[in-house]
Amino acid sequence: MVEPYIKCAECGPSPFLLCLQCFTRGFEFKKHESDHKYEIMTSDFPVLEPGWTAQEEMAVLEAVMDCGFGNWLDVAYQMRTKSKEECEAHYMKNFINNPLFSSTLLNLRQIEEARTADTAIPFKPTDDPPRPTFDSLLSRDMAGYMPARADFMEEFDNYAEWDLKDIDFVDDDSDLLHALKIAVVDIYHSRLKERGRRKKIIRDHGLINLRKFQILEHRYPKEVQDLYDAMRRFARVVGPIEHDKFIESHALEFELRREIGRLQEYRRAGIQSFCSAKVYERVKHVREDERRKRTMLVDVLQYIQDGRACQQWLSKQADIVSQSIPLDHVVVRRRSAPPLNLTGLPGTEKLNDREKELCQVVRLVPGAYLEYKQALLNECRRQGGLRLAQARALIKIDVNKTRKIYDFLIKEGYINKT
C-alpha cells in the first residue's frame, strides 16, 4: 500500500485499507461503508531528527541490513533519497552513538551471551575442533560426538529409518494399506521427535564434554554430589538454568546447615567468640587423637594373648596407615619411562617449546594438557589464586603429574598461589 492511505477505524479485526483514489470515490466492500470513521496512515513525519521521515528511517535500517554495515554507497543507492555521507552520519549518530540505542544493544548482547554461555558444544567456532578416532577414550567421553560435523557418530534409535526404507505410496493401494503406510510414517516421525528431544537435552545442559561436567560437579561436597546424582534424571523436565539454580540452592542450604550446626556446637560448649572457637577446634582435634590412641591400646590389649589374632590386627592397621599417607609421600623405585613422542598428536601445534617439553617428560598428550591447563586457569581466575590441593581436586590424574603441571604453570606465570 502506497502512503498515504486510509485505514477504516470500524472494520475489524483484520484491518481494512483503502488507497486515496478508492476513498475519494466512496468505495464500499462487504461490511465496509463509505460513512465509517477512518484514519490517515502515513509515515511522512520526523522521528529522530528533522529532515528524516519515519519512512526513511525504516528504509535506511533495511538498506543497512541488506547491504551490510559500512557499505554506505550501496545503502544510499538503495534509499535513493539520501547521499552516502548523509546515510553514514545519520546512522552513526542515531543508531550507533546514541546512548539510548547503545545501552539497549548492550543489554541485548549481555542477554544473548548469558543465554549461550553453557552450550552443548564445548569448543569455540574459532578453535580447531578435536577429531577423536573411533572408539577412543575421548570419543567415548564425548558420546560419539563429532565436533567437526556438529553431529553424533551414532544417533539415538539409529535404525529408525529401516522400517521406512521399503515403503512406497502407489495409486492402486487399498485404503487399509494406505492407512497402514501412513501409520508407519507417523511412528517414524514420533521416533525422530524423540531423537530431537534427546539432542536438545544434551545441548541445553552441556553434556557433550563429560570431563568438564565432572570437574564442575566435583566442586560440591559429597552430600551435594549425591543429591546431584539423584536429581540428574529430573533435569530433562526443567531447563538448564532452573536445574542449576536448584542444585546451587541446595548446596547453599547444606553450607548454611553445616555452619548452623557448628555454631550450635560452640554455643553448647559455652563458646562466645570466634577466637575461643579456634582454641576449641584445636583442643577438639587433640582430644579425638587421644581417643583414637586409647581405642588402639584397648585393641592391642585385647589381642595380645592371641599371637595369630594380633598379627592379623597389625596387618589391618598397617593397611589403614598406608591408605592415610598421601601418594606424593610414597617413594616408588621404578625405571623412568622414555619421553613421549608428540609427533602427529592433536594439539601439539598449540604448545610452545616449554609446554612441549613438559608434555614429553610428564608423558601427557597435548589435548589433555590443554584441557587441564584451561580448567586450572578458570579456577584460579574464579578464586583469585590456586593451591595445589585445589588443583588435585580438579584434575583426577596421578598426583605427581598434577604437581609438575601446577609447578610449571606457577613458574610460567599462568596462575598464582593464594
Image (cartoon, rainbow, N blue to C red):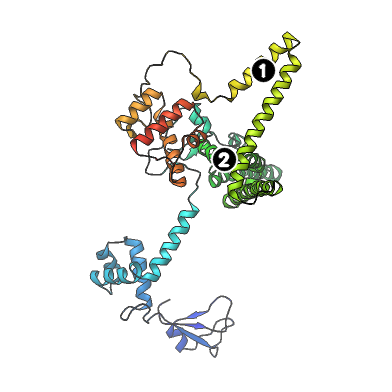
Estimate the x, y position of residue 34 in percent, counting from the top left. Answer: 53, 89
Say if 268 sits above or below 301 in the image: below
Q: Which residue is mark 2?
A: 217
Q: Is residue 47 visible?
A: yes
Q: Is residue 320 left or right of residue 1?
A: right
Estimate the x, y position of residue 85 in percent, counting from the top left. Answer: 23, 70
Q: Could you say which quadrant of the image residue 310 lies in?
A: top right
Q: Would you say the residues marked 2 and 1 are in contact, meaning their CB atoms lie under 8 Å apart?
A: no
User: How far is disc 2 from disc 1 in space, using C-alphas?
Assistant: 33 Å
Q: Residue furthest bottom?
A: 35
Amino acid type at circle 1 is Lys
Q: Secondary structure at mark 1?
A: helix
- In front: 189, or 108? 108
First along the sequence among labels 2 and 1: 2
- In front: 368, or 190? 368
Q: Residue furthest top?
A: 307
Estimate the x, y position of residue 403 in percent, counting from the top left. Answer: 44, 29
The quadrant in which the N terminus is found is bottom left
Estimate the x, y position of residue 66 in percent, counting from the top left. Answer: 35, 62
Q: Residues within 10 Å of mark 1 (few under 14, many from 20)?
A: few
Q: Secondary structure at mark 2?
A: helix
Q: Is residue 265 left or right of residue 62?
A: right
What residue do we see at 43% from left, 66% from top?
A: 104
Q: Which residue is mark 1?
A: 316
Amino acid type at circle 2 is Glu
Camera-side mark, 2 or 1? 1
The quadrant in which the C terminus is found is top left
Say if 398 sits above or below 250 in the image: above
Say if 258 sits above or below 325 in the image: below
Q: Could you say which quadrant of the image residue 160 lies in?
A: top right
Q: Is residue 192 visible?
A: no
